[in-house]
Amino acid sequence: MFADVYISYPLDEYYTYRIPIGINISMYCRVRVNFAGRNITAIVIKIHENEPKDFKVKEIIDIIDNEPIFDDRLMDLARYTASNYLASVGETLAMALPSAKKPSSRYTIPFKKSENRQGLVLNEEQKLVLDQIMTESGTVTLTHLIFGITGSGKTEIYIEIAKRLITQGKSVIYLVPEISLSSMIFERLYGVFGDDLIIYHSHLTPNQRLYNWMRFYRGEAHIAVGTRSAVFLQCPKLGMIVIDEEHDGSYKEHSTPRYNARRIALYRSRAEEALVVMGSATPAVETLYACEKGVMKLHTLKNRYGNASLPEVNIVKIKSTKPKHVISPVLKLQTKRAIDAKRQVIYLLNRRGFAPIVICNSCGWTVECPQCNISMNYHKDRRMLCHYCGYQQAVPSICGRCGSEQIDKVGSGTQRLEEIIEKEFADFSIFRLDQDSSRKKDTVPELIERMNRGEVDILVGTQLVAKGFDFHNITLVGVVLADIGMNLPDFRSTERIFSLLMQVAGRSGRGDVPGKVIIQTLDDQNPLFRFIRNHDYYGFYRSELEVRRMLNYPPFTRMARLLVRGSNEDRVIASINALKQAIDEQVKPIREGISVLGPSSAPFGKIGGNYRHHIIIKSGNVTTLQEVIAASRSAVAGRDVYLEIDIDPYELM
Ligand SMILES: [Zn+2]
Ligand SMILES: [Zn+2]
């Protein structure tokens, strides 16, 4: 007997191995094989008796699984994912499946079961949305967006739908963006579903992941909560995939295959007739556009759950980014007032500024590429560079808006903001949460406990503080410098900063006392702030959509990014130029409706010793994009250069 197997290499073919006599192997199991001199894991996709004629067949070394760990549906999903994102089926399967050899004998969820969560009471608005989604399940409309302001109670609706589907014998996958911040939601779902729940994310050990995968696959548990890779979990009958905070960038995978869990969920919805319910207070522009086009059904929650009201947002212009000006008198005063009243404060430090931008220190104006409408970065020798199309110009000597001569580089030195805050409020208890500290296992639980006990006066942190927390005693949110992040060389930077500011504002005033938000900026005339002050998502959406339409960015086109990286920059540049030439050859006969930008050095021009250069391709037809790339990718060849293909890139840094 012989087995056809896929291996996790970027190779399109499957390979045939002999099954040793007396060994029982079934389809859709993992085995060990020797491939090109190395012992590796392989996935059996077919068993047959046709001995290959043209080469000597090797024997399978070992069996990993004694029973199948997936079925045809994952095979189909892997083929779709591989072809959509130009990866191999083997790589895709290896990414989707758990990697451990043996499941851990037991996995206990580290939460206590709480009792009083069982009886949720939905308000009228929530009931209406629930009924609409339930009546339409089983009909044509399977995909839904719940657009609900922060604190409007989307979670209660997901839970109610999940309970009903599980009663019908179906399973539910519940996706959340960040593991580190999800312990609150895990605990809450465990309170409702108990041992019918499994958790699936990268903080589990591989053995625990395999154990949980198998429980969900066999139908021993009916609800799975996890991060993006949980979208591939298999179950007897899929009822729904929930995508909470659907706008969040963490649903996009950063290595091959660079899938977006939203797109995978939509495919599974069609293939397995399951509901997809997405939710957000700041839906992605592309998602709301899909609703307007009738691809998804939109439901709106306009009121905050309980009696909470939306916070009052103040935009405060600061004089400069110098240490003595960066905390404005009004922010200082309001912070002290809030803490005196035994309330808590969040400070958001947006620290995405990496490559220096040139900004007018008097009005906040920045230099944009005339062709791409994205911020240009300070490059070298007083030159500015557009990281999309490669356009360059000299650093202007006066501000293009107000004529001031105070234009200068910013973007570095923001680390000092923490020190400034700590010095300014030395009498208060400050908790710092950033990407690094949140990776440590205990940081977030410790933060939650200390916040709830009232031991923290000011929570200072980066983007993370904007997400997911539901602290009821916060009455002030301060955004220290909104300008950073507003001017990243990425067409989504406006959307991202808008969403971030709306989300962080939503952390304020979730309890009985109304909240305040103070956003500090050099450029208080930026129209974005008007939308934020008025909590006007649609105003933002319409203005952003217009820009995207004018400049032909998604949702009006599909995009791909090809990035070449390597330690020798000359080789990287030679490769990207060869790639560009190959693409041009492909594009020439079909020139209409396809545009090629670059090559240019990527905004992060060098990461970990690797130089990075990229090309961006746009076309309304994704198949065209895929074909052009498939036909030209071999132009990047050699040991020391690597090509990264990203279809529908989320970040262009
Ligand atoms: Zn100016
Ligand atoms: Zn440009």
Image (cartoon, rainbow, N blue to C red):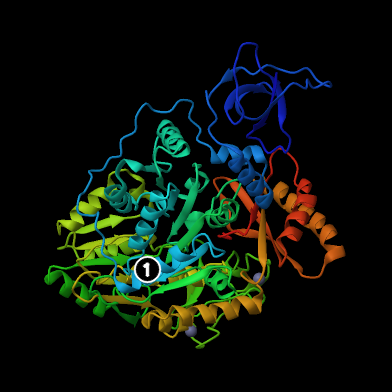
Residue 483 seen: no
- Please state, as top left, top right, bottom left or bottom right, where the N terminus lies in the image: top right
Q: Whole-percent x and y of residue 335?
A: 21, 72
Residue nearest the observer in this picture, 261 or 197:
197
Density class for disc 1 (Cα within 10 Å; few <14, some 14-19, many ≥20) is many
Determine the secondary structure under disc 1.
helix
Disc 1: which residue: 503
Q: Position of residue 629 (x, y in %)?
A: 75, 54
Q: In terms of image quadrants, where is residue 200?
A: top left
Q: Callout 1, which amino acid? A: Gln
Q: Depth check: 63 or 251 in front?
A: 63
The residue at the point 65 percent across, 49 percent down is 80
530 lies left or right of 74 = left
> Would residue 621 appear left or right of 529 to someone viewing this image?
right
Q: Residue 199, position in %: x, y? A: 38, 43
Asked whether, in this view, residue 211 is left or right of residue 290, the answer is: left
Instruction: Pick whichever, 282 or 488, lies toward us.
Output: 282
Furthest residue to the right? 589
Pick out the residue farthest to the top: 22
Seen in the picture, residue 607 relative to 72 is either above or below; the reply is below
Q: Is residue 229 left or right of residue 582?
A: left
Q: Which quadrant is home to the C terminus?
A: bottom right
- Out of 69 and 208, give the one closest to the viewer: 69
